Image: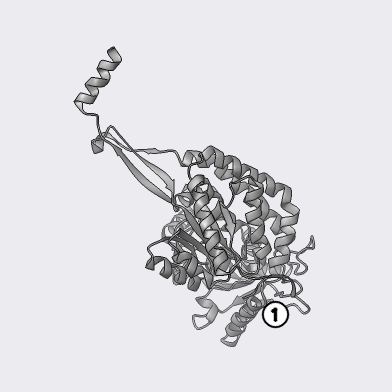
Amino acid sequence: MAIATINPATGETLKTYEPLPDDAVDERIGRAVEAFRAYRLTSPQERAGWLRAAADVLDADTDAVAELMVTEMGKTLAAAKAEVGKCAKGLRYYAEHGPAMLEPRPADAGAVGAEDAYVVHQPIGVVLAVMPWNFPLWQAMRFAAPALMAGNVGLLKHASNVPQTALYIEELFRKAGFPADVFQTLLVGSKAVERVLRDDRVAAATLTGSAPAGQSVASIAGDVLKKTVLELGGSDPYIVMPSADLDRAAEVAVTARCQNNGQSCIAAKRFFVHRDVAEEFTRLFAEKLSALVVGDPMAADTQVGPLATESGREDVERYVQDAVDKGATVVTGGERVDGPGWFYRPTLLTGVTPEMDLYAEEVFGPVAALWTVDSLEEAVEIANSHPYGLGSNLWSEDEQERATFIRDVQAGMAFVNGMVTSYPELPFGGVKQSGYGRELTELGMYEFTNAKTVWIGPRSSQQAEGTTASASE
């Protein structure tokens, strides 16, 4: 894939870049290593100051950065501005809480025969981040903020269709006053990832992307014994029970499915509705989906913009057509929008069966599949049959149903009467083929630290006597 900005609303190529040659990549890795030698010795308080400064820069750059993201990947302008604000919040979260997270954690010294014992989290070095295009600022920032707070340095290999956003992120940290080369962007293709990851100077990697990409990175990292954190997508279940507020559940369902033009790993994609309320919920859901305004992502009233790539829209069309050919019913949508750009109408399908490709795969576009179920247990059973396990949603006022859902659903996150989203204050990550490891909170920071055990033995009696004598003199 070319490294280029292609406006998904028009299909126009706006800017292209030559990938960095191998020798330039090697030189940047070397600069990262040199930067780490000094940066790891800075105090958490110094790092917190730079993170706050980065948040201030983001605030000042909001309009320009938001328009850049719209131009590169097609999210609506309102969504882009919200993403910038979320990144600033994440930076300030680690600036505020990071120093305390890095304080030594006392252990029971007496239990281990020590005078003192504790655990200290220390940075591990140069970390490679392989990031996707769908949240081009937030995905990178939720790695960068905790990693930089911990004292690591970062190399960013961003998606090839958001190069200007990738370059801005490097510029952001430079403008915020971080030491030179603490965070660098590598404009390279996906084939360069293996070479960088195998480099002995690179300590670890994090990837957000597809399951095949995760398998590749995990295999390479395993071969050279390096730590990885993987977030590999999801096909989140959204379960609606009879006690739910149906209008509210349908309203949130629309946002949960169509946020970011339907291109979100934690978007609700599979909807399981109890038979007692299925007809009413389906009607509400379809009405609200069909009422969404699809159009120019820069326009203030647009709710759904284009898909980010032409191939992405082709994939969505293929999934829908395969389902229809095998007996699924299109309740609303199911077609592209005429004209330039890669637009696709919000779609609701019913009658989905295991023979259809979308049953067990992630559809990265505004397409919802709805099942009618007879119980919560049936909904959870079907939900758990999927290979992914990132987020999950339940709408119910019944306490027992909530408890059962939280206990039994196979997912990294369980949201009740609300939409799955990410917060700096909550761990983010999945199970099964959705990957492993966690981002955000202190857990995300600790993924790329050395939890070093420190044991200090008791002083000898002679030392103790000498100290006492000195004190008496």
Q: Residue furthest top?
A: 473
**In the depicted structure, whether residue 322 falls above or below residue 97:** below
Looking at the picture, how far across and down is residue 194, in whole percent?
48, 69
Q: Which residue is mark 1?
A: 335
**In the depicted structure, whether residue 358 falls above or below residue 214:** below
Viewer can see residue 379? no
Viewer can see residue 48? yes
| Tally of marks | 1
- The front one of 209 and 332 is 209
- The front one of 242 and 65 is 65
Looking at the picture, how far across and down is residue 424, in whole percent?
55, 49
**In the depicted structure, whether residue 282 falls above or below residue 95:** below
Which residue is at a point 57% across and 44% down the rendered structure image? 93
- To which quarter of the image does residue 288 belong? bottom right
Which residue is at a point 72% across and 57% down the rendered structure image? 66
- To which quarter of the image does residue 20 belong? bottom right
Q: Dot 1 lies on which element? A: loop
Amino acid beneath label 1: Glu
Looking at the picture, how far across and down is residue 397, in whole percent?
53, 54
**In the depicted structure, whether residue 470 falls above or below residue 300:** above
Give the quadrant of the C terminus: top left
- The front one of 302 and 53 is 53
Give the quadrant of the N terminus: bottom right
Q: Residues within 10 Å of mark 1 (few under 14, many from 20)?
A: some
Looking at the picture, how far across and down is residue 366, in whole percent?
64, 71
